[in-house]
Amino acid sequence: QVELVESGGGLVQAGGSLRLSCASSRFGFSIMGWYRQAPGKQRELVADITRGGVTNYSESVKGRFTISRDNPKKSVYLQMNGLKPEDTAVYYCHGIPSWGGDYWGQGTQVTVSS
């Protein structure tokens, strides 16, 4: 059983910053990323990154969020700057191993006050 363990969520004022971290308990993933789900909305991709460092961002976070990973540490990070109230959501770490499938973290709450 592999776990994706997230940390770094919290409450921040609009314009502030937070850094989310996620570490795999066992193996590394070909693609790692972050999704979020706000109340009453579907879960959506925020950003993902390949093992080689190719990144992909949703339009709503481009220029404000930066995803990165540390392959030896089997970890992925999300630096969130210029946070807005509409960024409020539960953020989930996601991993896709080389053989396919989906692995999810338990989620971490990010709340941005106006």
Image (cartoon, rainbow, N blue to C red):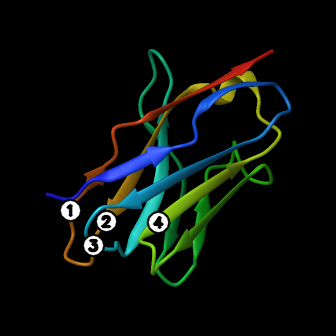
- Which amino acid type is marked by label 1? Gly
Q: Residue furthest left?
A: 1
Residue at 20 percent across and 62 percent down: it is: 101
Q: Position of residue 18 (x, y in %)?
A: 70, 41
Residue bearing the label numbered 4: 75
- Give the side of residue 14 with respect to residue 20, left or right: right
The tag earlier along the polypeptide, 4 or 3, is: 3
Q: Looking at this view, is 63 or 104 the one in front?
A: 104
Q: Secondary structure at mark 2?
A: strand
Q: Which mark is residue 27?
A: 3
Q: Residues within 10 Å of mark 3 (few under 14, many from 20)?
A: few
Whole-angstrom CA distance, mark 3 to mark 1, is: 13 Å
Q: Residues within 10 Å of mark 4 (few under 14, many from 20)?
A: many
- Give the side of residue 18 with respect to residue 2, left or right: right
Residue at 41 percent across and 71 percent down: it is: 74
Residue bearing the label numbered 2: 96
Mark 3 or 1: the one toward you: 3
Q: Position of residue 60 (x, y in %)?
A: 69, 42
- Which amino acid type is marked by label 4? Ser
Whole-angstrom CA distance, mark 4 to mark 1, is: 18 Å
Mark 3 or 2: the one toward you: 3
- Which amino acid type is marked by label 3? Phe
Numbered-mark total: 4
Q: Secondary structure at mark 1?
A: loop
